[in-house]
Amino acid sequence: MNKSTIYAWLLSIVCFLVLMIVTPSIPQSQDYHHFADHRQFFGIPNTLNVVSNFPFLIIGLIGLVLCYHENYFRLSLRGELYGWTCFYIGVALVAFGSSYYHLEPNDARLVWDRLPMTIAFTSIISIFIIERIDEYKGTLSIIPLLLVGIVSILYWCWFDDLRPYALVQFVPCIAIPLMTILLPPMYTHSTYWLWAAGFYLLAKVEEASDKLIYKWTYHIVSGHTLKHLCASMVPVFLTLMLAKRTIEPERQSLYKIWKVTLMKFRDDKNKVEASVCSFSSVPILEPQ
């Protein structure tokens, strides 16, 4: 591990410690467990909030199989295989952890809901480092990042403080879209990352609007159920990206591509306007 990597980890640790000192603790609100939809079908408590986790299992297993089936995703770096394997394991485990929690929502069961999600979140960060910064550093970061996620859950369990877990959730939400736009990709179809981020943001909005959406839909479906379905679209889009992408021959960031496209659009628009002005200035000769 070189000096720059060590400095980066030290800086991250210092920033985290400063944040923990200057911000108040965030205890787990017990109101979080009071979801809008309590209906029971076929003897399953909170049925829709439970069964809406099933897509996570399907896409997680599909992703794992395709990672190892004749290199279907054409992963060219060994670190990528490790990162995507951890990601799909986390996605598949979300189905079990979240279903277990929603059968009887409480703090003890919430641990098993959040733990798989942290595995998926932290794996995504390491994948980005592998693809867009450095393969060696990204591969080395997989285990430390997974441990950071696990420790954030344990810290909440021991001290009833959500700050580390909130940071683990918040950082990928900001870092991934920014890295997608600003850093040149190794592969094509990078915009799928933005679609995935958009669906995750929508899922968080639906989660916050659980009771309101349940009321708006005349008690047909709650916001939390829709949150599960939208969140499951994140691995769906990433799986589509892996299946379709190829090595990028000219590595350019989305920001640069968009900038060039915008400049070209402006130039074409100016040329059209100039042509219209030239045409309108031609005198019309009236017959004698």
Image: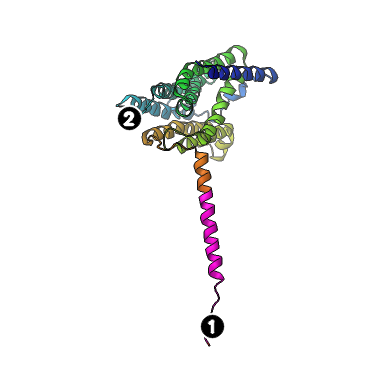
Task: Give the overall secondary structure of the magenta segment.
Answer: helix
> Where residue 268 appears, x then y in whole percent?
51, 55
In terms of secondary structure, where does tag 1 sit?
loop
**Viewer-nearest residue: 46 or 112:** 112
Contact, CB < 8 Å: mark 1 with mark 2?
A: no
Can you tell which mark lies on residue 262?
A: none
271 part of magenta stretch: yes
Mark 1 sits on what residue? 286
| Residue farthest along the front direction in this orientation | 3
**Viewer-nearest residue: 177 or 107:** 177
Mark 2 sits on what residue? 72
Residue at image position (58%, 14%) is 155
Residue at image position (50%, 25%) is 125
Q: Amino acid at mark 2?
A: Tyr
**Viewer-nearest residue: 81 or 78:** 78
| Residue farthest along the left direction in this orientation | 70
Answer with mark 1 or mark 2, whichever residue precedes in sequence. 2
Q: Amino acid at mark 1?
A: Glu
Q: Single out the mark in the foreground, 1 or 2.
A: 1
Which class describes the residues within 10 Å of circle 1: few (<14), some (14-19), or many (20+)? few
Mark 1 vs mark 2, CA separation in Å = 71 Å
In terms of secondary structure, where does tag 2 sit?
loop
Q: Is residue 3 above or below residue 133?
A: above
> Where residue 83 appears, x then y in whole percent?
43, 23
> Where residue 265 appears, x then y in whole percent?
51, 52
| Magenta-drawn segment | 263-287
